[in-house]
């Protein structure tokens, strides 16, 4: 009987390690997608001040740009941190702690990316259609991000 308990315990531990490895790999895959989007936005935002018409935008729009730029850089830092930490801390001794900490960093990056998407939407729409339409479009994008990225997952979180 004791042998069966040890064997069963070893099997559970093996399955847990496989699950930990698989979920860690899934998390790193998700980061690749988030990081690419952030890199594209950051690249766009880095070039924007050097374009010909940038100096003509209103002071308020320059502040919106600063918010967009800083939040895009923060998202890049957050989305690249788990991969960099994973590489530097190899082999991982505490996978569960690493995944928990990385998840918090990724959520922070997602907040920053949300801000980036909303503020860049405002910048583009304000330039293209101006005034009230840009406010309406920005509100719609903010609402979609709020519902799809935040509200739905948080509501489902308690339901398994």
Image (cartoon, grey):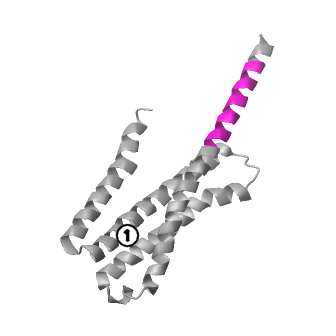
Considering the whole magenta stretch, tell me its main secondary structure. Answer: helix
Residue tagged 1: 120
Q: Establish if 123 lies above or below 10.
A: below
Q: Which quadrant of the rendered structure holds the N terminus?
A: top right
Q: Which quadrant of the rendered structure holds the C terminus?
A: top left
71 left or right of 152 in image = right
Q: Which residues are magenta?
A: 7-24
75 left or right of 155 in image = right
**Residue shown at 42% from the left, 38% from the top:** 157
Residue 52 % position (x, y): 40, 88
**Residue shown at 31% from the left, 59% from the top:** 141
Instruction: Say which quarter of the image contains residue 120.
Output: bottom left
Q: Establish if 142 lies above or below 17.
A: below
Q: Nearer the viewer, residue 75 or 135?
A: 135
Q: Establish if 99 lies above or below 17.
A: below
Q: Residue furthest right?
A: 3
**What SS does tag 1 mark?**
helix
Residue 74 % position (x, y): 50, 67
Instruction: Say which quarter of the image contains residue 115.
Output: bottom left
**Residue shown at 30% from the left, 81% from the top:** 60
Question: Is residue 40 shown in magenta?
Answer: no
């Amino acid at each position: 009987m004791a042998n069966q308990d040890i064997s069963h315990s070893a099997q559970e531990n093996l399955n847990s390690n496989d699950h930990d490895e698989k979920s860690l790999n899934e998390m790193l895959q998700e980061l690749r997608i988030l990081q690419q989007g952030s890199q594209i936005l950051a690249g766009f935002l880095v070039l924007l001040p050097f374009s010909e018409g940038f100096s003509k935008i209103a002071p308020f729009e320059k502040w919106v740009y600063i918010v967009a730029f800083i939040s895009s850089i923060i998202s890049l830092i957050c989305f690249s941190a788990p991969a960099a930490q994973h590489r530097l801390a190899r082999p991982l001794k505490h996978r569960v702690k690493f995944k928990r900490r990385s998840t918090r960093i990724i959520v922070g990056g997602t907040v920053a990316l949300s801000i980036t998407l909303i503020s860049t939407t405002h910048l583009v729409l304000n330039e293209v259609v101006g005034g009230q339409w840009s406010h309406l479009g920005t509100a719609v994008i903010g609402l979609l991000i709020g519902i799809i990225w935040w509200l739905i997952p948080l509501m489902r979180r308690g339901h398994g």
